[in-house]
Image (cartoon, rainbow, N blue to C red):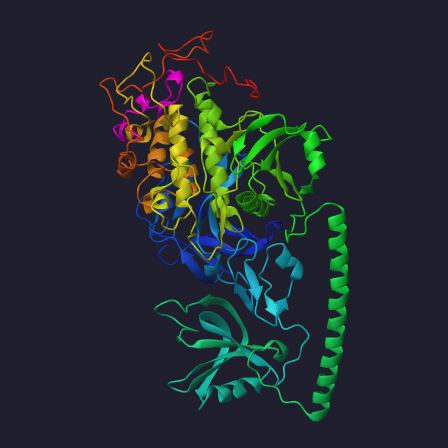
Amino acid sequence: MNLTRVHNLLSWRTLTNPGNGFYSLRLKPPNYGEFELVFNGTVSYWDTGKWTGGAFTGVPEMTVPIYRFDFEDAYSPMASFGFTERALDNGVRPPTMFRVEPFGQMRQYTWSSQAGSWNMFWSRPESICSVKGVCGRFGVCVGEVLRVCECVKGFVAVDGGGWGSGDYSGGCWRGERVCDDSDGFEDFGVVRFGFENMSSFKAKSRSLCERGCLNSCDCVGLSFDEKSGFCRNFFGSLFDFQNLTTLESGGGGGNGNVLYVRVPGEVSEGKIKRWNGKVLSGVVIGCVLFLVLVLGVVVVTLVVLAKRKRLKKENGLEEDGFVPVLNLKVFSYKELQLATRGFSEKLGHGGFGTVFQGELSDSTVVAVKRLERPGGGEKEFRAEVSTIGNIQHVNLVRLRGFCSENAHRLLVYEYMSNGALSAYLRKEGPCLSWDVRLRVAIGTAKGIAYLHEECRSCIIHCDIKPENILLDSDFTAKVSDFGLAKLIGRDFSRVLATRRGTLGYVAPEWISGVEITTKADVYSYGMTLLELVGGRRNVEAPPSSGDRKSGCETEDKWFFPPWAAQLIIDDNVAAVVDKKLGNVYNIEEAKRVALVAVWCIQDDEAMRPTMSMVVKMLEGLVEVALPPPPKLLQALVTGESFRGVKVDSSNAVSTAGSSSFCDNMEVSVADSESCIGEVFSPPDGIVNVR
């Protein structure tokens, strides 16, 4: 159905109630050349901007060439708007939907067949706090994922159940507390807000302005201009608070003054109460009784803690202040020693410890990481448990439990039967088909994007590399090893960290010792993406004298990225793609992935895309432009240990001769291996799949 002057797009009442909601998208009268979001059918709070013939000026995402928009008879009462999906390069038309959410945002979703879910492509307004009425009366918009609104201090939610399910429109109220002259005022700073009624008058001081408000129970707040002595009293209710303290213009109710909201006296700060003698005596007696009670609680608590500490010592547990994550299984050291057969089956060596394969009593196969260094290992243990204990995502390795017993620190992970991605990037290693490589690239990007943007606190991994990308039985990529992860709050964009990432993957700004952001992970991901496309490591020992060469230095080590980046920019991606694939890969997908890799390893972190944008680029939802060459890469390899890579006339990648582990398979081109949808010649512990 097309949207017209009489046909609007209406929100649901809540996420689970399809009844009529408060928000709608409609053609904006009287010109009907743009759309607007409206609250309660009357209050407009966002518009698309005018129609330019192909898109609206306020929605640049409409220029992505995956839709065809039709706006017939624009700028007239007969206007009609609709759209259809365009086919992607592979001929598929991606399902999509536009929806006005119950909380007032207009969002576009695209269907991801790989994840089996809808992914949000864009939303307007970008900040939910710009939506009118989203928090109701006396509700303050916080804008956090898990806490959108909160009540003014001293107020409670009118509909507690609604707030619990994400419907904040009922707002807040004072409860059963009757207003009186003991009420005080909460300083809200310089804010813009909505109100029902207002009266204004001259007052010599703010205290007189407050007295005028306290004389009426209908007065809910005030503002006072110290310079002019102008007092405003607001009546009824207040809503749609927007903090303007840090803005250059604007102000409370449009006048730039501080807003003071009337709150019950017991929660007011700065309200001086006068007590009579009887009340004061009662307060003193109450305080004495309270202190006696507190002292008794402290004594009992100390006794309980002492007893608990003694029991822990008797059971061999260490009391070191560590608080375990409650949703994880706590293993004893003996359990894990038995599960791993005395730590005999080594899977690999990770950050600060060795990983062993184990089998629990219920026959579940797990990977047990034993931390080996007391100092750094302990720090890593605490970081990993606190960081990933409660994180669940299809592209992140799940932590099942841990052991903290005496000096033993062990982590128990789900087992990844196909091992680390690094095993597939060796010349003698198994061959991944192009489809699998693309799934690994997208899955890894989604896992990192989740850590950066969807967790309650932003998580910087700090050590993205093939060894930390594991593959399960279906070759689904899962990011592992959060031992170097740094947590930063939502209010901060940067974090200082010591240089603990793996050389060859760390961003230039990290090597230089400056503060890092999530863009350091983007750089490491770009380096890993080059390895995935090329089917080889970025830093390798040179080929021996008996091997084929194609212009590579033979001294010490050689560096793949500068050479690969230049070829990709020169539109010679075929020379970079793993020769073992032959011509059995999608060249357009390979170009897209290669260009994304070069964007990720840009010298200037501001030029690198976010990981959520990387996902959209890889999935073909956003066009990938030609990136500039990352010049610092060559500067990083000018030392004696890294000689760089030369390019010969054939633009071929230097290899160590023709591999033979796929000799029994049909090859698609000379000196190539067939990897069509299969994985061949797995090393120990890695299974074949079809």
> Which residue is depicted at the point 38% across and 15% down?
582
Horizontal arrangement in the rendering, residue 414 relative to residue 35 (left or right):
right
Q: Residue furthest left?
A: 649
Determine whether 250 is above or below 526 in the image.
below
Q: Tell me where residue 574 sits by quadrant.
A: top left
Horizontal side, residue 549 vs residue 486: left or right: left
Q: Which one is in front, 487 or 304?
A: 304
Above-or-below relation of 385 to 240 = above
Q: Nearer the viewer, residue 126 or 429?
A: 429
User: Which of 166 and 642 lies nearest the eye of the viewer?
Assistant: 642
Find residue 126 and report its horizontal and vertical position in percent. Answer: 43, 53
Residues 398 and 404: in front is: 404
Which residue: 63% across, 84% down?
180
Please state the total of marks drawn on the protein image.
0
- Residue 97 visible in the snapshot: no
Please report the bounds of the magenta region as a residue range: 565-589
Image spot of residue 669 (x, y percent): 36, 11
Residue 289 seen in the current view: yes
The x and y percentages for residue 533 are 39, 26
Q: Quadrant of the C terminus?
A: top right
Q: Is residue 240 above or below residue 340?
A: below
Is residue 245 part of the magenta span, yes or no? Answer: no
| Residue 499, quarter of the rendered image | top left
Q: Is 574 included in the stretch rendered in magenta?
A: yes
Give x and y (percent) for residue 316.
72, 45
